[in-house]
Image (spheres, coloured by chain):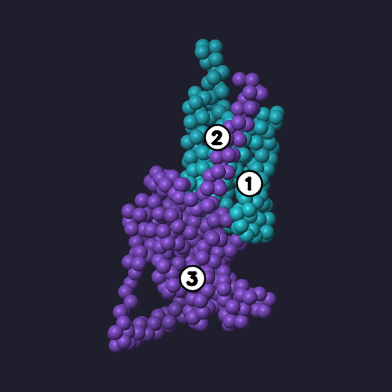
Amino acid sequence: MKILLKFAHFIFLIISVILQLSFLEQLKIFNINIDLVLVTVIGIAVFEGGLYGLVYGFIAGMLLDLMIGQVIGLNALLYCLSGFFTGMIMDAGFKRRMITYILLIFFFTEANILLTGGIYYLFNFTSHTAALGLEMIIKPVCNIVVMFLVFPLLKAGLERSEEIGFKYKDQI
Amino acid sequence: MAPERKNLKNIIILILLIVICITVITVSFRQSDIFTNFRLLTLDYFKPVQEKTFQAFAPVAKFFINLRDYVNLKEKLEALELENALMMKDYSENINLKIENDALRKLAGMDIRSDYQAEAAKVIGYYNTRWQSEIIINKGKSSGVVEGMAVVNEKGLVGIVILASSSTSNVRLLTDPQSSVGARILSSRKLGLVEGGSDKNIYLNYIASGELVFKGDILITSEYGKFVPAEILIGRIKRVGPTGQTLYRQIEVEPFVDFRTLEYVLIIKG
């Protein structure tokens, strides 16, 4: 059952990559888009643990980079770091509560924006400060809104699996 | 598994993946072709599902885009009606000029310019961040598309093909910070480069500070591009920076194409 759930999360991740490219990139607020893949990776790390966050983050990022990335490997690096550190934070004893989720999404979105900007700056791209400021305000809010849709879906599968595991625990 | 061992395992995997990522970033940024084949395979593999998803979600995306446009619909309509009236006047003048031009070309023994061979394509993916603006289209090498070809729609130049797999292609839009297209100011015939800025606007660069440039001037592609044909509409000058402070003028361009609503495009094959 657990393997099936992990596989379902993996499929969910691939769907989020496809949706990111086919749909969400068109829905922009002040030219800033929602990062569904990041939200999904963080969600998986919260519910499945840091190792899955790390590996799934790497796979999703690399897929995104191979499909459309300008610097291949950048999204893979950022998403796998986000997945790993989310898992570490959850292991440190934070409870699975809404406020924790919101803070995680906020923190990792900001970190991703700054890290992406920093890496592109190292590669000689020019950065527009006003656009960076606007992105740092709007993007976390958008991602938090999406979190309210994504996290219940990821959690639903998990709760169901725990329920079944508990019910047949004595028979196994 | 003990928590310490689990953590150690995670850290080892993290270090391994970071090393892989840094290696991939370095190699890919040096324009190595090692990853090109992987990219082409990925694009081809995901094309069917991406095409269907884009098609399925297009009405929803359109609805939200249109919702934003309703805010200033009245002003837009008035501006379009005015523009339409002016264009109708220009249209009749242009037909006469074309007939005259063809007759003169015949007399001078020059070839009459033929229309370009073009391939219609559908947009199946969109990626627009601060650092990058690209679309994925559903035509590739199997349809004769190669890197460097110009992509247009009914309003003007959309971008340039930067990667072509067998069934899909990635097109770098004019708003991409790495985009650069040779351009000519229609009225003064001055040459410059239309480049994307980091603020997602596009600029006409390398026009000397002393040159006279007017707001509203129309920009077309120059005749010096290898694949990009001349005289394709790009946009009109929106803002001209002050003279004297720098070697070149800062000129902001308003593209004719609305990059948010791209659905079908034409790839110009020459």
Q: Residue at x 54, y 51 (%)?
A: B29
B270 or A153: nearer the viewer: B270
Task: Give the alpha-carbon distance from disc 2 to disc 1, as whole Å.
Answer: 17 Å
Q: Mark on residue B182? A: 3
Task: Give the alpha-carbon distance from disc 3 to disc 1, as whole Å.
Answer: 34 Å
Tell me if I can see residue B32 in this picture.
yes
Instruction: Say what amino acid the circle numbered 2 marks.
Output: Val
Q: Nearer the viewer, mark 3 or mark 2?
A: 3
Residue A49 sits above or below residue B234 on the image: above
Tell me if I can see residue A148 in this picture.
no
Q: Colour of chain B?
A: purple
Q: Give percent across and percent down for residue A140.
A: 64, 47
Q: Residue at x 66, y 39 (%)?
A: A104
Where, by quadrant of the figure, is residue B13 drawn? top right
Mark 3 belongs to chain: B
Q: Nearer the viewer, mark 3 or mark 1?
A: 3
Residue B52 sits above or below residue B16 on the image: below
**Helix, strand or loop at mark 2:** helix
Look at mark 1 in the image and give the residue it sits on. A112
Image position of B154 (left or right of B185): left
